[in-house]
Image (tube, rainbow, N blue to C red):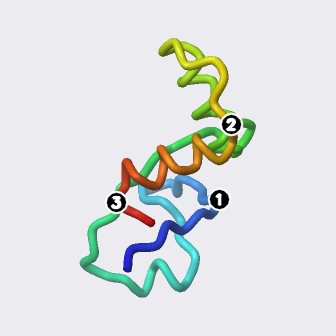
Amino acid sequence: MKTARRYIGKVLPDGHLSLPEDAAADVGKVFEVILIPVEETDIYTYAETIAREKGFPKLTEEEIERIIHESRGIG
């Protein structure tokens, strides 16, 4: 089963991202990474904005969550 993990990381001086210990232990695994500035860490608000721009103004938070999960094969 795939699970999404959410965390706030920092771009290090060498260009790498800081990771929590449990993610850093997954050496060699491939992940999709979406960078959202910390001021916009609420993925649901971000997704809602995108949905509105694409012509879907009345999506519920549950619908947005389902779309996010389905797009990543989670659920």
Q: What numbered label is drawn on residue 8?
A: 1
- Using the rendered view, name the quadrant where residue 45 is placed: top right
According to the picture, the residue beneath numbered tag 2 turns out to be 60
- Please say if 56 is above or below 22: above
**Horizontal side, residue 57 vs residue 51: left or right:** right
Q: What numbered label is drawn on residue 73?
A: 3
In terms of depth relative to the viewer, which is nearer, 70 or 41? Answer: 70
Spatial CA distance of label 1 from label 3 is 22 Å
Q: Secondary structure at mark 1?
A: loop
Spatial CA distance of label 3 from label 2 is 20 Å
N-terminal-most mark, 3 or 2: 2
Q: Secondary structure at mark 3?
A: loop
Q: Residue drawn 37% across and 55% down? A: 72
Q: Secondary structure at mark 2?
A: loop
Q: What's under tag 3, amino acid-wise?
A: Gly
- Please say if 50 is above or below 35: above
Q: Can you give x and y, in whole percent of width and height, for residue 40 in the image?
A: 70, 37
Few, some or many residues within 10 Å of mark 1 (<14, 14–19, 20+): few
Q: Are discs 1 and 2 less than 8 Å apart at CB?
A: no
Q: Nearer the viewer, mark 1 or mark 3?
A: 3
Spatial CA distance of label 1 from label 2 is 25 Å
N-terminal-most mark, 1 or 2: 1
Q: What's under tag 1, amino acid-wise?
A: Ile
Q: Can you give x and y, in whole percent of width and height, for residue 3 in the image?
A: 46, 72
Q: Residue drawn 25% across and 78% down? A: 28
